[in-house]
């Protein structure tokens, strides 16, 4: 029998031997076990991604903003900047859609807030009024780009995310539209960010409140946003285990709050309670008055619209459709007067231009002002501008109209003083250049006008 001290000696030697062995700790996800390198990496993150990637994306979209200096469609002014200018400065042209209450003030309110801040700071110069809203839209598009990258990294891997980011950055149509103050642009940005929180298989950023709020906001800004989201909302509802909770705790509260805010905003600026989303649906679907501006055949989006938007990416897209897993073979497509008025002049000058509202009275053989003018421009000019008192100081026309109204220009002493490039591919009534004519008064007339 060994003495008691011998047992203690053996136990001590065993502990010594164990101390020389490498101790293996089980890896845990607790923040207590996060390495210093991971902590430093997280501190260098912005929006959940590498800060350099985020800053590069912001710089890219700002460069994009200043590079694009053309106009695309009238609504980038009529449905945003011009309305915002009227909201803040109490002058600005409001198109027929606003008198008919087909549009809501939620989207213009964003830019009106910017204008108001500039006005309070005494910095409401023309250049800042033009560029600040576009820079704000560029920043939102940069956020959407980063969220798209993050989503693809979660669903696939970093290499795939880099290629998607590269394609998004190189898309000609994205470059052309993503910094414009269009409701389409805002809808696209909100849709991308909402997809980041949508319950896609493999996503790690699912948040039903955030994604449904963004979808509701997109619908308020542009009601047609509901079209690509309907199948996704039904898909979420179908796969959700607690369907009642999804409706009662997420969809209904979010929809109620968003719609209520929209109603209050429109009540303030219209002066009466207005549900613009219903008016929009009634005008475009029930009454089908939107066809006044033309309509496309059923295949247009696939035969023309989508290929043009994709551009050089089209063959790679078609190839990818055959290679992509079934869970990604869902196609979501957001289909994306060239006259700029008070929001870009910022001066209450009297202006007149050809208008083309649809037939809101039910008249047969209806012609808008623009159609009437182009039937016979000379007759229209002589009728609408019969004497010297009615003649404007400046006339702005497309170059294709110059020859047809040359006799009027000469007889009224108009001289071309400026020429601006418009497009390489003119069509319809537009031309390749815009001509500015100024009326040159004779010395005797000038003396009479002074008195």
Image (cartoon, helix red, strand yellow):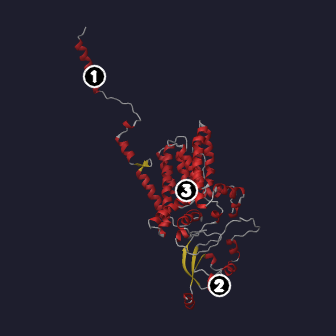
Q: Tell me the quarter of the picture where residue 31 sits.
A: top left
Please name the residue shown 72% across and 70% down the image.
Answer: 367
321 or 199: nearer the eye?
A: 199
Q: Earlier in the sequence, mark 3 or mark 1?
A: 1
Inspect this view and state whether residue 311 appears: no
The tag on residue 186 is: 3
169 or 37: nearer the eye?
A: 37
The answer to whether the residue labelled 1 contacts the one labelled 2, judged by CB atoms less than 8 Å apart, is: no
Please name the residue shown 50% across and 41% down the image.
Answer: 204
Graded by Cα atoms within 10 Å as few (under 14), some (14 to 19) or many (20 or more), the crowding at tag 1 reads few
Graded by Cα atoms within 10 Å as few (under 14), some (14 to 19) or many (20 or more), the crowding at tag 3 reads many
Please name the residue shown 54% across and 59% down the image.
Answer: 109
Inspect this view and state whether residue 390 appears: yes
Q: Secondary structure at mark 2?
A: loop
Q: Secondary structure at mark 1?
A: helix
* 432 relative to 41 in the view: left or right: right
The tag on residue 15 is: 1
The tag on residue 387 is: 2
The answer to whether the residue labelled 3 contacts the one labelled 1, judged by CB atoms less than 8 Å apart, is: no
Q: Looking at this rendering, what residue extends furthest in the top direction?
A: 1
Location of the N terminus by quadrant is top left
Residue 323 horizontal/vertical position (percent): 57, 45
């Amino acid at each position: 029998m060994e003495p008691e001290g011998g047992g203690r000696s053996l136990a001590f030697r065993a502990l010594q031997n164990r101390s020389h062995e490498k101790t293996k700790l089980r890896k845990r996800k607790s923040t207590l076990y996060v390495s210093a390198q991971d902590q430093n990496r997280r501190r260098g993150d912005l929006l959940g991604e590498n800060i350099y990637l985020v800053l590069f994306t912001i710089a890219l979209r700002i460069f994009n903003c200043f590079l694009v200096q053309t106009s695309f469609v009238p609504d980038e002014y009529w449905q945003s900047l011009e309305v915002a200018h009227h909201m803040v400065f109490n002058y600005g042209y409001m198109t027929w859609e606003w008198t008919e209450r087909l549009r809501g003030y939620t989207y213009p309110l964003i830019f009106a807030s910017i204008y108001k801040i500039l006005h309070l700071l005494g910095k409401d110069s023309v250049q800042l009024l033009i560029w600040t809203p576009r820079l704000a839209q560029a920043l939102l598009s940069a956020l959407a780009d980063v969220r798209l990258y993050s989503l693809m990294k979660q669903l696939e891997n970093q290499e795939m995310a880099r290629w998607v980011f590269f394609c998004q950055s190189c898309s000609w149509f994205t470059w052309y539209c993503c910094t414009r103050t269009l409701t389409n642009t805002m809808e696209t940005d909100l849709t991308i960010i909402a997809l980041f929180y949508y319950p896609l298989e493999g996503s790690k950023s699912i948040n039903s409140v955030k994604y449904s709020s963004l979808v509701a906001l997109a619908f308020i800004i542009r009601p047609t946003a509901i079209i690509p989201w309907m199948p996704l909302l039904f898909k979420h509802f179908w796969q959700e285990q607690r369907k009642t909770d999804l409706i009662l705790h997420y969809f209904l509260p979010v929809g109620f709050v968003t719609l209520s805010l929209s109603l209050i905003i429109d009540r303030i600026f219209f002066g009466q309670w207005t549900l613009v989303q219903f008016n929009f649906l009634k005008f475009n679907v029930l009454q089908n008055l939107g066809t006044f501006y033309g309509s496309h055949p059923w295949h247009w989006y696939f035969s023309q619209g989508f290929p043009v938007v994709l551009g050089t990416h089209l063959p790679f897209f078609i190839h990818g459709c055959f290679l992509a897993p079934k869970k990604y073979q869902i196609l979501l497509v957001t289909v994306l007067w060239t006259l700029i008025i008070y929001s870009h002049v910022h001066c209450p000058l009297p202006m007149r231009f050809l208008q083309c509202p649809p037939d809101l009275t039910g008249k047969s053989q209806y012609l808008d002002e623009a159609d009437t003018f182009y039937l016979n421009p000379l007759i229209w000019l002589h009728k609408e501008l019969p004497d010297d008192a009615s003649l404007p100081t400046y006339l702005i026309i497309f170059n294709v109209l110059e020859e047809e109204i040359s006799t009027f220009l000469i007889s009224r002493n108009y001289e071309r003083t400026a020429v601006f490039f418009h497009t390489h591919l003119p069509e319809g009534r537009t031309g390749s250049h815009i001509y500015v004519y100024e009326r040159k008064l004779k010395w005797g007339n000038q003396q009479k006008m002074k008195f």
